[in-house]
Image (cartoon, rainbow, N blue to C red):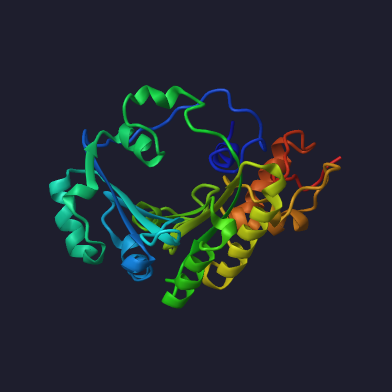
Amino acid sequence: MGEDLFWAIRGGGGNTFGVVLAWKIKLVPVPPVVTVFTVNKNLEQNATKIFHRWQYIAHKLPNDLFTAVWIMKVNSSQVGKKTVQAGFRGMFLGGVDELIPLIQQEFPELGLAKENCTQMSWVQSILYFGGLPIQPVEILLNRNALPRSSLKAKTDFVKEPMPETGIEGFMNMFLEEEADFAITMIEAFGGKMDEIQENELPYPHRAGILFESTYIVQWTNEEDAGTYINWIRRLYSYMASYVSKSPREAYHNYKDLDLGTNNVNGYTSYEQASVWGLKYFKNNFKRLVQIKTMIDPMNFFRNEQSVPPLWSP
């Protein structure tokens, strides 16, 4: 297919360059046993301070250890009241007896204990983080294992640690009524991501990023959609001063149509598409447009935020 197209389809956006009928995946080895953990801390348990410290540590942890923080509203220990919980989650490619001293040395503020940890196979860990029973693993073949709901997602990449005051304001927004069905998933970068060049593949968000934040709000009644979408837009606006800039980067797999869309008539200029294209792909966007122009100049494969050719019918 040529080196350019092969580069583009590995992260350049689905429904843009054609239909992939077959592919090969290069697997990497994992140990027979991994260790997962969850440590929940709410506002009354210094969640803000612990998260503030996590920002300075997570991207420097060994490559065998992945960590994330899930932020959501939960019931408080005080009857009838709510609080905000930071769930510190992780997976270690090894046993619990090796993980505990590692965390105690690198991140003692978390207070990780053996009862927070579970050893399992790597494929079971996928079910663990997906909120599904870890047995039987065949549930992964069931496309309807998780309930479906309407949602709106927005993303950010953070390159500098947020100050405690910024974190407090962020957490407090989850106490609002509209945040009843909201979650923010914060995933640490560093490690292998720092070793891959920005232009090696279309996905450019790698070296220098501390973590990615994915803000999600869900609803069941469509008449409530506007209320929840307005809330997540306010959350996104609040975060503007704490995240990447020029451009404010975004993750293409969570398409955010707030960033802009292709014209309905099928023609979108490079300048128009750059509004969201540079956020998703940074400097790789120009190469993606050139490849699109070469292999699909009539823009047959398109969607609201597909890469447009340099000219269209």
Name the image quarter holding residue 27.
top left
Location of the N terminus by quadrant is top right
Query: What's the residue at 34%, 38% (across, down)?
Result: 128
**Closest to the observer: 274 or 100?**
100
Query: What's the residue at 42%, 53% (across, down)?
Result: 196
Where is 291 relative to 215, above or below?
Answer: above
Where is 193 relative to 5, above or below?
Answer: below
User: Is residue 245 in view from this perspective?
Assistant: no
Residue 261: % across, % down = 75, 50
User: Is residue 212 in view from this perspective?
Assistant: yes
38 vs 233, left or right, is: left
Query: What's the residue at 26%, 62% (across, down)?
Result: 110
**Closest to the observer: 173 or 100?**
173
Task: Give the number of callouts.
Answer: 0
Name the image quarter holding residue 16.
top right
Residue 56: % across, % down = 34, 68
Location of the C terminus by quadrant is top right
